[in-house]
Structures are given as structure tokens and as C-alpha cells.
Image (spheres, rainbow, N blue to C red):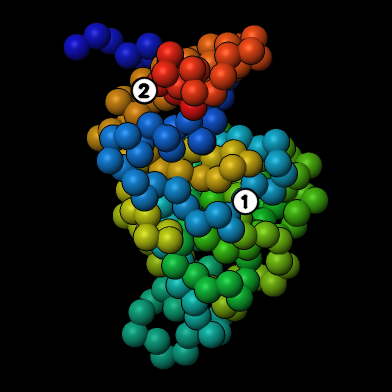
Amino acid sequence: MTSAPWRTDAELFDLARRELFTAVVGDCMDKLGLLHQFLPPQIRPLRDDMLLIGRAMPVLEADVYQERGSAANNPLMDKPFGLMLEALDDLQADEVYICSGASRRYALWGELMTTRARHLGAAGAVVDGYLRDTHGVLAQGFPAFAHGSYAQDQGPRGKVLDFRLPIEIGGVGIAPGDIVFGDVDGVLIVPQQAEREVFEAALEKARGEKLVQKAIEGGMSAVQAFKTFGIM
């Protein structure tokens, strides 16, 4: 087996930022039989030019109906935000805080969370719900993907139950360490066990598409281009 054109995550992520986009990576996963890797299309970047790539740090949230639970059986019910602060502090460099499990009644990400995540070198945030403090998040240039902006706080409405465990968003499984890749066209999950094959194929296809584009710009028909390059 030939060696991959990258040796470290930093090298892979840099290649992806320079040469790849979610459409080409998604196409390659389709060819490999990984047909359900895009998160729901409602999850969008806060700004269209945001690009996100990093390792998943999955977070499981749940709705609650009061900030502190009186006589609760679960001690987390008496803890504001549950384990949210611990999850945030556990972020590592180039990791993505990716959160699922909550309803759409409140925001799951905000400005102060962004400040802490940036300090830790995290790659971004993806939430299956809303974020808030939009101007503050945008001002920090931190890649954040959500259903949109909504100011209502999670404090009395939601708690993090656990983190660094498998979760699902829209039927897509996300395990700790999977690669999260997002841009204006969506967010996809690349399973760890397939990442080398996926990204090698994606780099080859992206570079091939440039040849196809050049040929079409030179007058080649779409039929001939596909016959010649096998890419469209």
C-alpha cells in the first residue's frame, strides 16, 4: 500500500482546506457505499464562507424543565447546564464540538463558549439546533454551524448529559474521532475507519475535476468530457 499524501491530521486538514469541498468528498463516499453521511441540510454555516474540518467531540444534550431539580434522582439535574462546561473544557486542538439530542426550544452554542473553544484550539462547532450571540461568534471568525440563530438560553431548558460518546444527527452516526467536514453546501461525517480511502479518492477527484473544467472551457462537450475523464 502506498503512503497517504499526508502524515498528520494537520497536513490532512490543510490539504482539505486548500483543495476539497463537501460535494466532492460526499461523492467519493457514495462510491464507497457510505450513502448517508451528510447531516440534515438545515444545519448551515453562520456565514457562507466558513469552512470546518476537525475530529468529532460528540456531546449529548437533553431537554429539562427547570434549571435545578428538587429531590431529583439524577445529581446532574441539580447542576446548571449539566456537563456542558466540562465538555467545553475537554475540547482538544482541531476538535469539533458537535451536539445532538435537544429540541429546538433554545440555543446550544454562544459567544462565551466560542471564546473558550478558540482558546483551546478547537476547529469549530456543529449543533443540531440553534446558536446565539451571533455578532459575538462572527466577530471571532469561529466556524459555527447550526439551524440558525435564536437567543433563548439553554440554562433552564437543557443539560448536557455526557460527551465523547456516539451520537446521531438526522440518522447519521457520529463517533468520537470521526472527521467532521463542513462548508456552505453542508456538513458531512467521515468515519475514522474509512478516512484514508475517502480523502485519497476525494483529492484525486478534485484534481481531476479541474482538468474536466479546463477541457469544457476549451469547448469539449459534456458527453465527451465524461467519456474521457469519467468525472462530471
**In what quadrant of the picture does the N terminus appear?**
top left
As shown in the figure, which amino acid type bears the numbered disc 2? Ala
Q: Residues within 10 Å of mark 2 (few under 14, many from 20)?
A: some
Q: Which mark is residue 44?
A: 1
Residue closer to the observer: 150 or 72: 150
> Would residue 50 be found to the left or right of residue 199 on screen?
right
Say whether residue 137 is visible.
Answer: yes
Secondary structure type for disc 1: strand
The answer to whether 145 is drawn above or below residue 2 in the figure is: below
Residue in the image at 31% along x and 42% along y: 34
Given this view, does label 1 or label 2 mark the residue nearer the observer? 2
Residue in the image at 64% along x and 12% along y: 219
Corner quadrant of residue 151: bottom right
Say whether residue 80 is visible.
Answer: no
Residue closer to the observer: 38 or 169: 38
- Which mark sits nearer the N-terminus, 1 or 2? 1
Which residue in the rendered view is the most extreme toward the left? 1
As shown in the figure, which amino acid type bears the numbered disc 1? Arg
Q: Position of residue 76 (x, y in %)?
A: 42, 73
Q: Which mark is residue 201?
A: 2
Residue in the image at 69% along x and 48% along y: 46
Q: Residues within 10 Å of mark 1 (few under 14, many from 20)?
A: many
